[in-house]
Amino acid sequence: MPDRYLDKLEAETIYILREAYNKVSPLGMLWSMGKDSNALLWMVKKAFFGKVPFPLIQLETGMELPEVYQFRDNLIKEWGLELHIADCPPEEDMDKSLPPATRSAMRKTEGLKALLGENGYKGIIAGIRRDEQSMRAKERVFSPRSIDGDWDFKNQPAEIWDHYMTEVPEGAHLRIHPILGWTEIDIWRYTQRENIPVVPLYFSKDGKRYRSLGEKNITFPVDSDAATIEEIIKELETTKTLERAGRAMDNESENSFEVLRTRGYM
């Protein structure tokens, strides 16, 4: 049963990717090197017969963990990827009214806005999931944004029976979320089945591991003894710890994530 369920999720994701490619242009895909992003990239290659037919983009702050950069460079060589690295503005240029960790996270939001302005993308693919965070639970698979990336979560199109709003409104772009309906444990079961590479930081070392990867100044490991994918899956079946427990901005203020997302965060 798990395999058939994963097959169904994979087929839905591939359908969304092909729908986006056929209906939205120009199109780009964000790659964070995290587990969700890697699984999505794997399915892109499946959907397009081993190729990535649109630009692959990393929003670069210079603050990723060293193991993440090493993983990125190795996978670029192994998979023959072409990566566009988009530099994000410095933290001192961010809104100083925001709490410190939220202000740091805002760098990628502003970096994405600059990228949209420079390249005119009408669609941006991102590997987010509804179960990660309550604000992401309000998302759509094809989500309209203003040209600056602003998101009105109270005004989202209905999506029924795989009918998506793929027409790009005037003066806007679409955020496309092909794995929105997956869960954290789905991603790990799929990663295990497909043998998808992941950053070693996800595996326990000295009783700590990363559940979620982000910049090193605002992301921290959580207590865990799970040192293999099998052990991670077993842990997730019973854990009460939130996936983003190690993300500083999620614990900074009640509405930090809402502020980020309405301003264009992934």
Image (cartoon, rainbow, N blue to C red):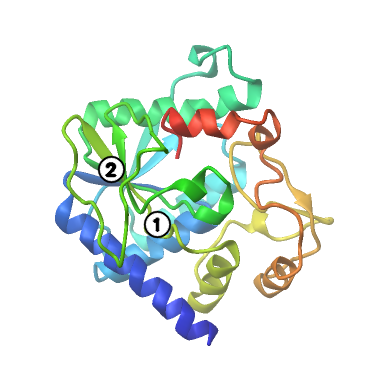
Mark yes or no: residue 62 visible: no
Q: Is residue 251 above or below residue 81?
A: above
Q: Residues within 10 Å of mark 2 (few under 14, many from 20)?
A: many
Q: Residue at x 27, y 29 (%)?
A: 147
The amino acid type found where label 1 is placed reads: Lys
Identified at 25% across, 26% down, the residue is 117
Q: Nearer the viewer, residue 221 or 258?
A: 258
Question: Is residue 234 or residue 65 the one in the foreground?
Answer: 234
Judge whether 218 appears above or below 98 on screen: below
- The label shown at residue 174 is 2
- Residue 94: percent from the left, percent from the top? 50, 16
Residue type, mark 2 in image: Leu
Disc on res. 77: 1
The spot of residue 37 in percent (x, y) is 46, 55
Tell me if 56 is positioned left or right of 34 in this view: left
Q: Residue furthest right?
A: 206
Task: Please tell me which residue is depicted at 76% across the width and 50% down the height of the picture.
Answer: 222
**Outermost residue, bottom direction?**
1
Cα separation, mark 1 vs mark 2, equals 30 Å
Residue at image location 49% in from the left, 54% down from the top: 129
Point out residue 135 in the picture as x, y percentages from the top left corner: 53, 42
Q: Which badge, 1 or 2, is on the more N-terminal residue?
A: 1
